Image (cartoon, helix red, strand yellow):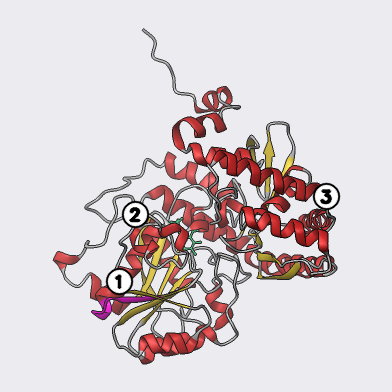
Amino acid sequence: MDKTPFDIRALVERHRQDALPLLERYVNPSFAAVLRTIGFDINFVRGQGAYLWDDRGIRYIDCLGGYAVFNVGRNHPVVREALKQAMDLDLPNLLGLGAFRLSGLLAKELVAMAPGAGVVGGEPLDTVFFANSGGEAIDAALKHARAATGRCRVVYCDRAYHGLTMGSLSVCGNAEFREGFGPLLGDTTQIAFNDLPGLERELARGDVAAFIVEPIQGKGVHIPEAEYLREAQRLCHKHGALLIADEIQTGLGRTGRMFACEHYGLEPDIMVIAKALSGGYVPVSAVLTRRWIHEAVFSSMDKCSRIQTTFGQNDLAMAAGLATLHVLREETIVENAAVVGAYLMERLRAALAKYEMVKQVRGLGLMIAIEFQPPRLRSVGLRTGWELLHKMDQSLFCQAVLIPLLTEHRVLAQVAGHRQDVIKLIPPLVLSRENADEIVAALDATIGACHKFPGPVWEVGRKLGGAAIKRFGGKRGEVSAPPM
Ligand SMILES: Cc1ncc(COP(=O)(O)O)c(C=O)c1O
């Protein structure tokens, strides 16, 4: 009897309409319900660069970027070709006991581009530990810090997001992710972002292994005050603690520099990257450390693999990483993020200044937030709408803006964080000025529509809130797409 050949193309074609039903039935029914409720149940069938297409052939600008994964754009031909070549080489992948060639090469490149590399007399980040996801790499970074300092406590910031593994969740400043999963790691302390006296107070107790911080906070796109991070670094060193920079979202060009640390003259002791290193294809993360920290962890032959993961240096991930770094350099993508990001932010500020509910447009490179505020007291109608939506769900107002942005103006974006009236744009860094103009026009139109009460956007919000409350038994906070 003939064997059935495996044909992924045919499989995808056969199930062209099935993505949502499959999600609903086998993977995550609640998430499917959220997508349906918020009108994000679009059947996307193709992605390229900064664009997505649905099954009707309609083109969308992707300002969500797979939660900041697609810095080089979706399905970049150079990364794709590198992966095909790597497969055709029949490499001796995952040797286990053996030396991995591609991981050595990727580590060499990362070390050469890390903050502080090449500084005479400096103490560079010169060893790399590879893992598969951001959260897993954060866990590894915390272990490095504890082993290297012989101390336990980790200080982190409110609103911080470092992942959802048990370790990384323990240093997340977002209570909603913790609920029901405790107790988490002990010996962690939350302080306010930008609070230097608070940080020094904790460090002065002499038991802090590390202060972990995102140079720009992903949840809400919060930018540090001018001297905050440098001073935090100085305080860490004064008190014998390590500085861990989480560049998982900000790294690899997102903010218009290769690493956000560069904006602030920061040379962390440990730096974590992930997301975009994958080229949007193969999960990978990396923890860069100073050599003495590495040596404190892997301190003898019997301890040479005491932090490890089976797939940590797998060839396809390494090939994706190497190709991604090549593309970032050769195609001046980081520069594009700086130039187009500044242009987009300037145009957004100009276009949205007229709206009373727009509080601020902020960001760096192509990591941009639009924050909203309650309408003036004398705008009675708008005020009623605002209060109604916020009573139903904290993120409903933003979601009510995002739905017409997607369904009428074909721009995909996200709510930036729980309990924040903030929309976030983190598109692929290949975004063009023309794309930026389209995004500005789309946001101008949707935010403009919100400033008329009654109006279609408020109606969307009201229906959304009602549908969610019905579906989720009156519980609040479950209507928006989960912010990452
Ligand atoms: C700053 C930051 N750190 C850590 C993570 C966790 O990464 P992962 O989802 O790959 O575990 C994320 C994910 O959004 C992130 O933005």
Residue with the mark numbered 3:
455
For disc 1, the neighbor class at 10 Å (few under 14, some 14 to 19, many from 20) is: many
- Label 3 near ligand 1 (CB < 8 Å): no
Please say if 162 is above or below 14. below
Q: Give how far across and how far down residue 133 sits, in percent.
A: 41, 55
Residue lying at 85% horizontally and 68% vertically, measured from the top left: 354
What segment carries the magenta color? 148-155
Residue lying at 54% horizontally and 70% vertically, measured from the top left: 217
| Residue sticking out furthest to the top | 1
Element assignment for label 3? loop
Locate residue 28 relative to residue 237 in the image: left or right. right
Q: Is residue 154 magenta?
A: yes
Residue lying at 30% horizontally and 74% vertically, measured from the top left: 187
Please say if 237 is above or below 213. below
Type of amino acid at the residue the image marks with label 1: His
Type of amino acid at the residue the image marks with label 2: Gly
Which mark is drawn over residue 144? 1
Element assignment for label 2? loop
Q: Give how far across and how far down residue 239 sits, in percent.
A: 35, 90
The answer to which of 187 and 234 lies nearer the viewer is 187
Residue with the mark numbered 2:
312
The answer to which of 371 and 457 lies nearer the viewer is 457
Residues at discs 2 and 1 in contact (Cβ within 8 Å): no
Element assignment for label 1? helix
Type of amino acid at the residue the image marks with label 3: Gly
Image quadrant assignment for residue 347: bottom right
Q: Earlier in the sequence, mark 2 or mark 3?
A: 2
Mark 2 vs mark 3, CA separation in Å: 52 Å
For disc 2, the neighbor class at 10 Å (few under 14, some 14 to 19, many from 20) is: many
